[in-house]
Image (spheres, grey):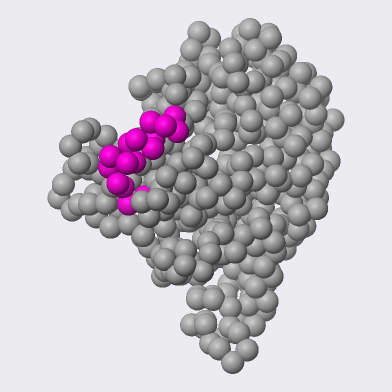
Amino acid sequence: MNIDIHDIEEILARQEQWRQHQTINLIASENAQSEAVRRVQNSDFMGRYAEGHPNEPGKVNRYYQGTRYIDEIETLARNEILELFKARQADVRPISGNAANTAIALGYLRGGDTVVANSTDAGGHISHGPVGVIGRRIQNRGQALKLGGEKSVNLHYLPLTEDRYHVDAQKSIELIDRLSPQLVIMGKSLFLFPEPVREVAAFCRTKGIPLLYDGAHVLGLIAGGQFQDPLREGATWLTGSTHKTFPGPQRGVILGNLDEEGEKKFWPAADRGVFPGSSSNHHLNTLPALLVATREMKQFGHDYAAQIVRNAQALGRSLDALGTPVEARDFGYTKSHIIAVNVAQFGGGVEVAKRLEDNDIILNYNMLPGDEDPRNPSGLRLGVSEMTRYGMDEQAMGELAQLMHDAIHGKNVKDQVNQLRARYLEMHYA
Ligand SMILES: *Cc1c(COP(=O)(O)O)cnc(C)c1O
């Protein structure tokens, strides 16, 4: 050992102390992993390759030798995730949610195709948008991507109801009927309420159009039975990240519940899209961790997800009652792990997010529906998955709301934030 790494280790220790012990983390796309999920990631698999599918008795599906143990892990991970989501098809190889969406884009879409999805300002993910993988995939070389207008264009946005936090099912069906797109995408990043998947998927089926449900954020809520179940509602593919509400390693997954005919028609696109499409080697050392998190969710997912939703609603109620306006009040603020707070009158999202970070409350600024300038967003996005995992309940959310309210109004509450956090250091639901 003659390489000096103590400075690197010191940075890691400071990160660990700050983010695992001092801060209250409300970043909706993040979570904290159990000791077991962390431990199994440090293994020999870190340096290995395994492309293709696990070998089977008498059948070679891999392109490398030496894979007998990752074959065991991958087979277990696939089978246990199928069971958890009551699915018929699963691909556990995408290395992130974006890679899972990329797989569908590469496997199913072609230049010039038409897609209907959520717009970015309505909460849609960048991968669905004009500069994301979906937009890039359907853009013809040398031609600008045509957005939304009347004349036969590629990328259209799902119409919203007047409150702008719900997709309008009837108008969506009319749009899909008129355009006959190759793909409809539902699901988003500022994801407060379920999407009308059942109605829209039923209509899509009459026209042979597949529906991709992007459950990156809500995968853990789906696993826990506390959000809509897109596979039961008729989605063709469910893509997700395994590290947001699903408290596993940073990876992705594609799930399906297709009958034999549907599987033949739509699953090869996902399979080829994953490999050789969006990944070759799939970061083997993190796959055992996905298996551990799957078992945690099988045992604790229902209780964990239910407490997440209760906490998000409680935080919304408490902040709103203190005079910090929370979006979607008429609908109980949220049915997920996320709430959206409007801080335009307190200096705007960028400034207020920084003020909160100075007090060890970590979150991200966010555009709200109707915002036009992404550099001057009026909102904050708050997610409670991680703090719920550390045991916070509705009453703790009330205390947190008061501290946030004080910090937003310029008070220094860093010590109180650290003290509140110090009461919630033990990992639950694992
Ligand atoms: C976070 C997110 C993704 C991307 O997931 P990564 O795992 O970060 O690659 C995809 N879709 C939606 C809706 C997301 O919110």
Q: Locate residue 102, reporting x and y percent.
A: 41, 55
25 or 396: nearer the eye?
Answer: 396
Q: Locate residue 379, reporting x and y percent.
A: 50, 21
Seen at 28% across and 57% down, the residue is: 110
Q: Locate residue 59, reporting x and y percent.
A: 55, 88
- Residue furthest to the left in view is 142
Give the vertical position of 170 relative to 108 (above or below). Answer: above
Q: Locate residue 247, reporting x and y percent.
A: 68, 48
Quadrant housing residue 31: top right
Magenta region includes residue 172: yes
Magenta region includes residue 202: no
Q: Which residues are magenta?
A: 168-183
Seen at 60% across and 20% down, the residue is: 331
Seen at 32% across and 41% down, the residue is: 177
Seen at 65% across and 55% down, the residue is: 85
Give the vertical position of 47 relative to 418 (above or below). Answer: below
Q: Is residue 226 left or right of residue 36?
A: left
Which image quarter is the N terminus in?
A: bottom right
